[in-house]
Amino acid sequence: MRRNIIVSFLILQILVVSSSQSAPGFDFFYWVTYWPGAICTSQRGCCPPAKGNTASDFVIHGLWPQFNNGTWPAFCDQTNLFDISKVSDIVSRMEKKWTEWGVWACPSNETKLWEHEWNKHGTCVQSLFDQHSYFHTNLKLRQNLDLLNIFKQKGIKPDDGYYGLEEIKNAIKGELGFAPGIQCDVDVEGKKQLFQIYICLDNYAKEFVECPYVPDRSCGSKIKFPKSPKKDYLAESLSVMASI
Ligand SMILES: *[C@@H]1O[C@H](CO)[C@@H](O)[C@H](O)[C@H]1NC(C)=O
Ligand SMILES: *[C@@H]1O[C@H](CO)[C@@H](O)[C@H](O)[C@H]1NC(C)=O
């Protein structure tokens, strides 16, 4: 009898623990990266960034909890706001892969972007992540997913060329098993171009999943993959230096 009580108590504890773990309070994650080449050519914000930024690769935007109905939780906790000292050991990696190209702040300010990502999205996923593991998880995803290389293997390159939207999605589907969402913006001539990629993960950010919901992200059936801004801006600043 006593043993039965202990056993049921244990089972109850297991149920309580596992149910609190299986209910992060949202349905899935978007992991979002953006292409710096689509920022300078859209004449948005300020470009190039204030700090020396040599990104010629996809840059992290953030990891966002989502509901299946297309809405999301945001700014869930004012008592645990971004504190850069909590990520001091990974800040140098963040500076390389999670830079701000002047879309969200002008002059560009990565700290502001990180602060926004944690305060808006990170505070809603504290059942899974603290500040350090939230940022570290993003870096790990970025490290494991070489999107530029996945595209290159399918002949899709940032060369100002036009590629089929389905071709772009299928390149990633071939690697992850699931198609991403693609968000476009427009260049100065009004041409649609690749801007952000939304990859869907389960609500533990462990497995890739079929996106339960992909918003209409205003791409055409063919979109431009703009060149990396790196060389242009380097060339420009060199010629400015030469003319001084
Ligand atoms: C979407 O789903 C969430 C979570 O179930 C719910 O809180 C929210 O009210 C829903 N929003 C709409 C617009 O249906
Ligand atoms: C960048 O943003 C952070 C966080 O909002 C702020 O503390 C800092 O002063 C900003 N830096 C500059 C140069 O504006």
Image (spheres, rainbow, N blue to C red):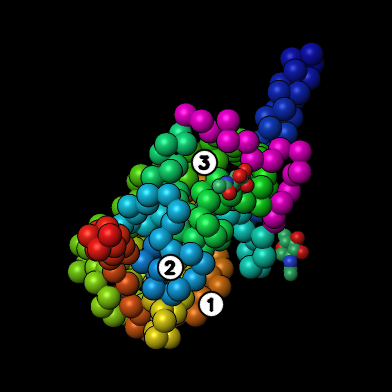
The dominant secondary structure in magenta is loop
> Does 81 lie within the magenta span?
yes
Residue 23 position, x and y percent, is: 67, 45
Q: Which residue is mark 2?
A: 39
Asked if 220 appears above or below 50 in the picture, the reply is: below
Left or right: where does residue 46 sit relative to residue 191? Answer: right
Q: How many marks?
A: 3
Q: Which residues are magenta?
A: 73-89
Task: Name the residue at 79% across, 16% down.
Answer: 1
Element marked by disc 2: helix
Mark 3 or mark 1, which is nearer the start of the sequence?
3
Of residues 103 and 237, which is closer to you in this image?
Answer: 237
The type of residue carrying mark 1 is Asp
The residues tagged by marks 3 and 2 sit, at their Cα atoms, a distance apart of 23 Å
Q: Amino acid at mark 3?
A: Phe
**Label 1 to label 2: alpha-carbon separation:** 20 Å
**Which residue does the numbered mark 3 point to in the structure image?**
135
Judge depth for marks 1 and 3 and give the one in front. Answer: 3
Rounded to the nearest angstrom, the CA distance separating label 1 from label 3 is 27 Å
Which quadrant: the C terminus? bottom left
Instruction: Report crowding for label 2: few under 14, some 14 to 19, many 20 or more residues within 10 A (C-alpha).
Output: many
Q: Residue 84 in magenta?
A: yes
Query: In the image, 149: left or right of 187?
Result: left
